[in-house]
Image (cartoon, grey):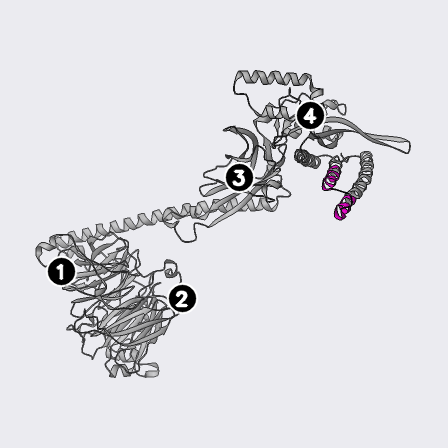
Amino acid sequence: MEARCAVETWTEFGFSGSSCASKIKFGSGTDVCLCTGSDEVYVFSTRERKLTAILQFPGPVSDLAESHDKQYLYVSCTSGVYCVNLPFLAPSTPADASFSPAELKISSEFLVVGEEGVLSLLLVGSVLLILSQRDTSWLLSLYKTPKQSQSSSYEMLSSFSLPLVSAVVHGDTEGRTEVRRRPALICVHSGDTKSPSTSSEATIADSHFCLEPVLFKLLFGIDAALAKSPVILCGLPDGRLCFLPLRLPGSRLQVLHSLEQPVVFVGASIVMETGPGHAQCLVAVGEQGRVVVMKTDKGGPEGGGNRAGFIEGCLPGPVVCGFVDKHHLYYSTGSDLLVLDLAEGSCRREGQEGDEETSSKTAAALQSPTSLNVCRVIALAAPAHNTAGEAQLLGLSVRGQLQRIVLPVGRKDAGLSNLPSTQVGRSVRDLLSAIGDVCERASVLKAAIKSKNQILRHLNQVLNVSFLLIASTNTEEHLPMQEKQIRCHATSRWSRLLQEDSLNLTCILDNSSPYVLERGWTLSVTVFPLSYSSSAGGESSSTSFSFPFHNLRPGGTFEITLPIAAAGDASFPMRVSCSLIFSLSSLLGEEETNLPGLQSSCISLPLNTLTVDWLHALQVNSPTTHTVNKDAASRSSNFPTDGIQAFLRSHRARCTGRGEAGGEGASNAEREQYSASVRVSSELIRDTLVLKSTDLDLQGPNVAPQNLCLSLLDWLFSEGAGGVKMGHQRDKIVLSSSVVTARGPNGESVKLTAKEVNVGEETMGKKESLSTIEVQVESSSVAAVCGLHHAVLCRVQALLQSAPERAASTKRVQSLGLRQALQRAERLLQQIQQSRVSGAFGVGVSTGQMTRSLLSVYRELRENPLLII
């Protein structure tokens, strides 16, 4: 059901309040005091419709309470309870009222009770009750207030404790937000007790209620009823509803009921117009909408006496705040303000209805609240009725707006045709105001739904990409890199900056999947050498790079360039590990990215691993330059800066070419040359390289050996081994001979030679031979020879995976070579053992001699005659 109400905004404070700490309290005269959980208390004049004072306290304010004579205001904050004289806040002259509100800083001289953790206050006569939360218990303290309320001589009368239990509510957010919910604290008087106020209504004062004597006795016991003791009722955040008789000797805190969810509001209602003005029921409302109505059931089981009945129901929640008048419960869900008629189904005709039928009607009435179409209300003040019979509520919105909400009493039966013109106009304004509230709420909900849909769509894309990469990682051994839908490949090239050479790697992320890589993704590249030099301290260090990107669509690429080695660095081969990292904070908006622990939340998905070896790091010399001496290599590293230097350098190179034989002899005399070789059968090269890349099918096995040598060398430099290719330097390489000279990353000159070698052996009077292509690596640097030999072997190993099976005749030649290799290995093993024994006992062998002996063994091992067929 819906009803029309008028909403008038009196003022806007410009803050964002919290339902756990916001409260509205009527002060002296027409003043209203408000707290929102901050360290300020606002005093607003309802008569002048303006803010008159702002009280600044040392800490966040948790609760407000006023004295019975409306002269003093008690305020609780982190350091204790303060007492402020309300008339002192009023302007002394009318001229003062025209200025801006007075800002008063409350100092420690207003502190009357120093106690930490105070959450709720209540004043009963001359007794001030303070409810605070400790580490393991709830503590209810009673203090005697002096006649001069601002005096610091507040005497503690007694204190009561109750063990603290954890909250059992669903979706409780107090632990995450670190905002403590204020317990509900009221005082219930028996109907035959003289009230502490001059009013005779059920609502004696704010948070004070007069209850029907029979119900009072049934709920709190006959001792409390005979002693005419006020009873303190506490609704705790753990769901317990506890009570304490004040004037009963030996009393203690007892549990009356449990809602199993934080108690938001406790009050008394249903006052008969013809009765003495006592409330006939107690109402407690939980945060998730659970409500319990406690009332007197006439006639117990089998015709017995009266008993206390507990009627439970569930309201549309969650409940943010609430208040009651004589017949109605008003509560806000944050998105709407609703009213519930408690008198409906509770009053029965004499002798016509039983208590069970009345209870069932009350439970049914709890399921049908009426919407007032007012949204975002987080605090309500005590409702009042004007002379026209209208119920008026004072509410505080989440935006800090103080609103007056007017609800006609006869809203169910009244029609517009019977109303005067002034009320018709006001009803139209009410309708427009309600429409505006609904439109605003719908707009906010629409924006929230759109944002959630975008987050879900983005999350769906992330999950699809994650499953795709995880599946490809699990099948990495059987899935070639070219078939992965999201992968990285790279190109290596040398560059020169500020007279320094460096090897750069251009890494390309290729998205061949059907999914879009949106915001939040980062390409992470980690480079670490598989070997390390002795100058590095015996440790291999890695370097990581991160490159954020967004909106990489299917078929798109993302290219980055990073340095991996400087000139003179020989830490090759290098492993380049690529992975995708997604930050979970990118799924949420900017206002939610500051949540604790969210900044470091991310997922890492591996892509593939690239390898940069010595062949990738070579700088191939010009085809006209075939010298391998160090002087020529060092001269080729210095690029000409003008035409004269270029001319002199080219002339010197031609002169060196004429005396090539003499130059090489001199170079070899100066530095010792090391070499390593790899032999591959001509048939394997012909089947896997030549016939598949050229139009030589008609020549069959008669391909010239020179073509095979060039094809093998060209394949070594062009093959993207390890997912890495050579850059623009590869386009400049035009192989006109089977000899390639280059400069390694360590600055040393190297030479790669491909030539035809017949491998064979005469057994049993029959000679068997096989045509092979031998690739020989030569250099004066052992590191260069080892690195290039390893790179060539890795490429040939990849070539074998695509080669067809060979016949048995070639296997015989391989077995012959294997027998020779085993005999040679036995001889080298004996030489190694002899060197180690002589070195251990120091028998006529120096360290230099042992090093040269081991180096000669290493060179023979590098010259492995095993044939790859």
Disc 1 versus disc 4: nearer the observer: 4
Q: Which residue is mark 3?
A: 513
Side (left or right) of 220 relative to 643: left
Find out whether the residues at labels 2 and 3 contact each other: C-beta distance under 8 Å.
Answer: no
Depth check: give the residue in front, 340 or 148. 148
Q: Amino acid at mark 2?
A: Val
Which residue is farthest front?
Answer: 844
Q: Which residue is mark 2?
A: 168
Give percent across and percent down for residue 605: 53, 45
Q: Which residue is mark 1?
A: 90
Tell me the CA gap for discs 1 and 3: 72 Å
Q: Amino acid at mark 4?
A: Ser
Residue 667 disc label: 4
On whether residue 840 falls in the magenta region, the answer is yes
Give percent across and percent down for residue 31: 16, 61
Give percent across and percent down for residue 638: 56, 24
Which residue is farthest right?
Answer: 765
Q: Is residue 320 visible?
A: yes
Residue density around tag 2, few if under 14, some if 14–19, many if 20 or more, within 10 Å = some
Sequence order check, earlier mark of 2 and 3: 2
Side (left or right) of 590 relative to 641: left
Q: Amino acid at mark 3?
A: Ser
Tell me the CA gap for discs 1 and 2: 45 Å
Disc 1 versus disc 3: nearer the observer: 1
Label 2, secondary structure: give it.
loop
Magenta span main SS? helix
Sequence order check, earlier mark of 4 and 2: 2
In which quarter of the view is residue 844 placed?
Answer: top right
Vertically, is 118 above or below 748? below
Give the position of the N terminus as an image quadrant.
bottom left
Residue density around tag 4, few if under 14, some if 14–19, many if 20 or more, within 10 Å = some
Vertically, is 727 above or below 59? above
